[in-house]
Amino acid sequence: MSASYRIPFNKPGLAGTEWQYVSQAITDGHSSGDGAFTKKCHVFLEQLLGIRKALLTTSCTHALEMAAILLDIAPGDEIIAPPFTFVSTVNAFALRGARPVFVDIRPDTLNLNEELLEAAITPRTRAIVPVHYAGVACEMDRIMDTARRHNIAVVEDNAHGLFGKYKDQWLGTFGTFATQSFHETKNVICGEGGALLVNDARYVERAEIIREKGTNRSRFFRGQVDKYTWTDIGSSYLPSDLLAAFLYAQLEAAQQIQTRRERIWNRYFEGLSGWAARFCVGLPRVPEHCRQPFHMFYLLMPSLEIRQALIAHLKEAGILSVFHYLPLHLSTMGLRYGGRVGEFPICETVADRLLRLPFYNDLSEDEQSSVIEAIEGFSAFSQ
Ligand SMILES: Cc1ncc(COP(=O)(O)O)c(C=O)c1O
């Protein structure tokens, strides 16, 4: 899609050591799951976040599916999520038979509106799945308090939010579970990949079993049992060690990656603030008590028409800018669950007006200047 664009939306960044680590995994003879590099990634994430257990998965989608199985989600259950998110946030639970109940997003951070949460809870609610959009934290104090009072599990969809914090606590460490994505569009990548973070020790052993096709193979490999067998439902959720080798190279370079992304994000923000204020364009909002991981830079344009015109204008300049999620309640599946136009007005207007700008580790100053200049040259406002 991006081949014809001078400045693509995303370019997977390389740390430089990926080839070396992948070839090491090949020559070491362990290319299936849970080899040496997978273990290194687990330790990296566990030490960074101070969590009980990290388990690499083949995607964030699969980590969410594991969370749904671990919570014994079943037909008749409900889960609460924002409608402005990726399909997997709710599909993982719908797969187990749960009904998604949506709660509109806040107009500032575009995260699930914690003030509307309580009203959506019913005796059937089994999980709340907040999404830290663009890695900016949801209001976790209120969400965790509501969840505790109703005895409902929280699964943080932290696909965007590795390295983000809420009031000095890492995102991914609040919920019973959290899920990460290492898809090539994220800050730290391995093509396709993810992780399940298990913050409650009671779930660790079953999580290992579900990830290993419903077997206790992990215990067998650790010498804790002398043969392994089918003990639960599960699937093959663990990635090849070749992917883990790629990911470990990226994790080791995380600090450099984050420094670059912070510089790019700040330059967009400073470069576009005056223009945005003049034309009533919204820029990302990061509350004081949140530390963001510089995952994304977006504009909130005044209308759908103006957003589409800016996409076309940037395309003319060889720059690919993209919108984001379509409201889930208005998707084919969402309508089947009873979704109605106008039901979640903030989500609907944001979906129409949001535009993401090119954002990748290797975006050069010249490229970024050209994106900013092209935006400043957009004339639809004066028509
Ligand atoms: C909020 C959110 N959750 C989950 C996912 C799914 O991630 P993955 O592609 O790793 O399955 C995405 C994808 O970008 C996402 O944006």
Image (spheres, helix red, strand yellow):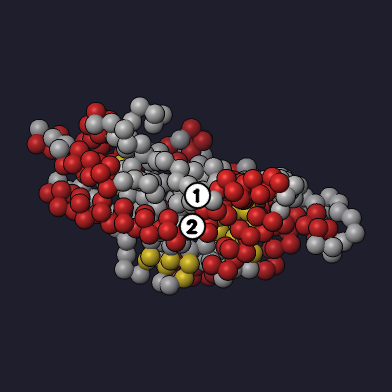
Q: With 226 as the anchor, is 254 left or right in this view?
A: left
Measured from the top left, where is residue 246 in percent x and y? 58, 48
* Ligand 1 within 8 Å of the CB at mark 2: no
The residue located at (67%, 59%) in the rendering is 39
Up/down of 14 relative to 318, above or below: below
Query: Which residue: 15% across, 38% down?
Result: 377
The quadrant in which the C terminus is found is: top left
Image coordinates of residue 81 in percent, x first then y, are: 48, 52
Q: Which amino acid type corresponds to the residue marked 2 in the rendered image? A: Ala
Mark 1 residue CB less than 8 A from any atom of ligand 1: no
Q: Nearer the viewer, residue 23 or 140?
A: 23
The one nearer the camera, 341 or 358, is 358
Q: Quadrant of residue 177?
A: bottom right
Q: Assign the N terminus to one quadrant of the image.
A: top left
Amino acid, disc 1:
Gly
Q: Quadrant of residue 257?
A: bottom left
Name which residue lies at 81% across and 58% down. 221
**Front one among 24 and 172:** 24
SS at mark 2 in the image: loop
User: What residue did someone put label 1 on?
Assistant: 16
Residue 253's disc is: 2
Q: Given the current orientation, which residue lies at the most extreme left position?
A: 382
Q: CA distance from mark 1 to mark 2?
A: 9 Å
Residue 199 as seen in the image, left or right of residue 376 = right
Residue occupying the far bottom of the picture: 168
Residue 86 visible to an observer of this rendering: no
> Do the numbered discs 1 and 2 sit on residues whose CB atoms are within 8 Å?
yes
Residue count near mark 1 (Cα–Cα under 10 Å), binned few <14, some 14–19, many ≥20: few
Residue displayed at 20% across by 51% down: 271
